[in-house]
Amino acid sequence: MQQKKYNAAHVAARNCIERANGILKRRFPALKYGMRVTVDHTLPVIVAAVVLNNIALMMGDDEPPVDEILSSYIQRMRLQGTTVDFDPVEVAPPDSAGHTGVFGMRQAVIDSHFS
């Protein structure tokens, strides 16, 4: 039963969140390709990007298009074997409540919020 509640909540939220993240990454490519700031400055930069995005939306600015030139440039660099310093690195969430790994974290969320 907990698993079904979690899955329903996950499906309902995922589309909206994925779309919002896509818009932010198109408007501010540094969020997609990487920022050259310290970890301490990362959160304020993300918050500022969200605030600026909300201001743009309130002012009637259109949703930003995909930057095809930047995307093709990055693809060419990768095809040439050049290491791109903003390639994403997969990071798993921290372990919680004795659960291990990504699936353990998911189970910890289910156990604590959907019981």
Image (tube, grey):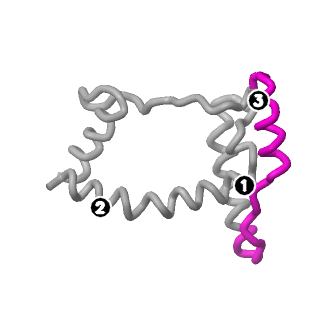
User: Image quadrant for the N terminus?
Assistant: bottom left
Q: Circle 1: is it few (<14), some (14-19), or many (20+) Cα within 10 Å?
A: some
The secondary structure type at the circle numbered 3 is: helix
Determine whether 20 is above or below 96 in the image.
below
- Cα–Cα span, label 1 and label 2: 28 Å
**What's the mark number on residue 26?**
1
Determine whether 71 is above or below 11 in the image.
above
Residue found at the very far front of the displayed protein: 79
Left or right: 91, with 27 as reference point: left
The amino acid type, in three-letter code, at marker 2 is Ala
Which one is closest to the eye, mark 1 or mark 3? 3
Q: Which residue is mark 2?
A: 8
In the picture, residue 58 is in which quadrant? bottom right
Please tell me which residue is depicted at 21% across the width and 44% down the height of the picture: 111
Q: Looking at the image, is mark 2 or mark 3 earlier in the sequence?
A: 2
Q: Nearer the viewer, residue 58 or 27?
A: 27
In the picture, residue 21 is in which quadrant? bottom right
**What's the mark number on residue 79?**
3
- Cα–Cα span, label 1 and label 3: 22 Å
Left or right: 22, with 71 as reference point: left
Which one is closest to the eye, mark 2 or mark 3? 3
Q: Nearer the viewer, residue 63 or 71?
A: 71
In the picture, residue 112 is in which quadrant? top left
Tell me the magenta residue range: 55-83
Q: Position of residue 96 (x, y in %)?
A: 31, 31
Q: Looking at the image, is mark 1 or mark 3 earlier in the sequence?
A: 1
The secondary structure type at the circle numbered 2 is: helix
